[in-house]
Image (cartoon, helix red, strand yellow):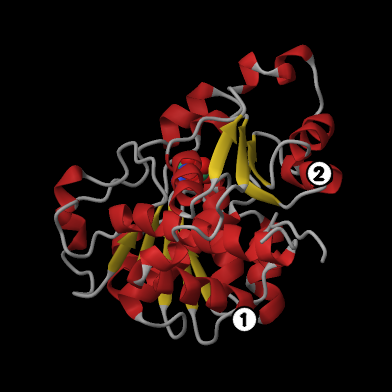
Amino acid sequence: MKKRSVIDVLDLSVEELDQLVATANDIIAHPDDYAHACDRKKLATLFYEPSTRTRMSFEAAMYELGGHVISMAGANSSSAAKGESVADTAKTVSCYTDIIAIRHPKEGAALVAANNASIPVINAGDGGHCHPTQTLADLLTIYREKNTFSGLTIGVCGDLKFGRTVHSLLNAMSRYPDNKFVLISPEELKVPSYVKQDALKSKGLPYEQTTDLEEAMPKLDILYMTRVQRERFFNEEDYLRLKDSYILTPEKLHNAKADLSILHPLPRVNEISVAIDDDPRACYFKQVLNGKFMRMSLILKLLKEAGTL
Ligand code: NCD
């Protein structure tokens, strides 16, 4: 048995993504069958950056599988504050637990952890790079809303430059057939060219880039809103100028499809008016719950592959 880590959504094949979704659906249908699947196993959460949903859903996922959780206190009150490297922390935590979920402000930190840990490592977000388990939450949501991953027009809107969830979502949805992409952002917050190249251009997939959300709206089956990532800006002035670029209000949905699905990885700042929360097209709180089921599915898979279960 070989330990396997998930740093990028591309570490999982399309067949594996489908299988993870199928397992999550089975967990939803038969939760009792999984209640002891990870008895006596331990998950470590190492979060060097703020988080509510990702960390708590990893923890809830492990508890619902019958396992236990050990969390590193924030970066400021652990040995990271004394200058310990991610590599040494990963080696240390491997002595105590069976699997690690790590979030870090630096791109590549999760890979460093994976290269040094003797147990599976899951990237829970590395800087502006990627966030594969948010994409798993997004995929289960899309599947449960649309019953397919193909033939969809997917609009991503907001901070497409620093928004790591968008990068991972494009890398996942571009591997399913017949999807079209509409990239909606201010000029300065466009999808980085390396992501566009790998996910879209290299496969010759149809995509458009626009600054105009309302013009794009009628085409969309999925609208994936994101917040402007204040913590990744080099200066506050730019953030203040760009932060309100897109605010989705009920009026802006006037020409949207009746079966549009509105997703957002959350946290929301003000990109979606709370007046939309009761609209049947709003899926972002379902997405939160789906994230827990997909993390259960992924923890099970990686622990089985590592021979721990
Ligand atoms: C996202 C993240 O951390 O990248 N949050 C999350 O995990 N649900 C999105 C964000 O912070 O804007």
Q: Nearer the viewer, residue 70 or 220?
A: 70
According to the image, label 2 marks what residue? 117
Disc 2 packing (10 Å; few <14; some 14–19; many ≥20): many
Q: Position of residue 101 (x, y in %)?
A: 63, 44
- Of the pair 144 and 34, the residue shown nearer to us: 34
Left or right: where 232 falls relative to 65? right
Q: Amino acid at mark 2?
A: Ala
**Residue at the image point whose x is 65% and y is 48% from the top:** 123
- Residue 221 makes an appearance in the image: no
Q: Is mark 1 within 8 Å of ligand 1?
A: no
From the viewer's perspective, is residue 251 above or below residue 304? above
Query: Which label lies toward us, 2 or 1?
Result: 2
Which amino acid lies under the numbered mark 1 shown in the image of this protein? Glu
Is residue 158 shown above or below 1? above
Specify the quadrant of the image occupied by residue 49: top right
What residue is rendered at 62% in x and 27% in y? Answer: 72
Element carrying mark 1 = helix
Q: Position of residue 125 (x, y in %)?
A: 60, 45
Q: Position of residue 151 (x, y in %)?
A: 44, 85
Image quadrant containing the C terminus:
bottom right
**Of pointers 2 and 1, the one earlier in the residue sequence:** 1
Question: Which circle marks residue 293 in the picture?
Answer: none
Label 2 – label 1 distance at C-alpha: 26 Å
User: Residue shown at 14%/47% (left/top)?
Assistant: 275
174 to the left or right of 12: left
| Residue in the image at 39% along x and 71% along y | 142
Write down the quadrant of residue 87 in the picture.
Answer: top right
Total marks in image: 2
Viewer-closest of 104 and 169: 104
Q: Which residue is mark 1?
A: 15
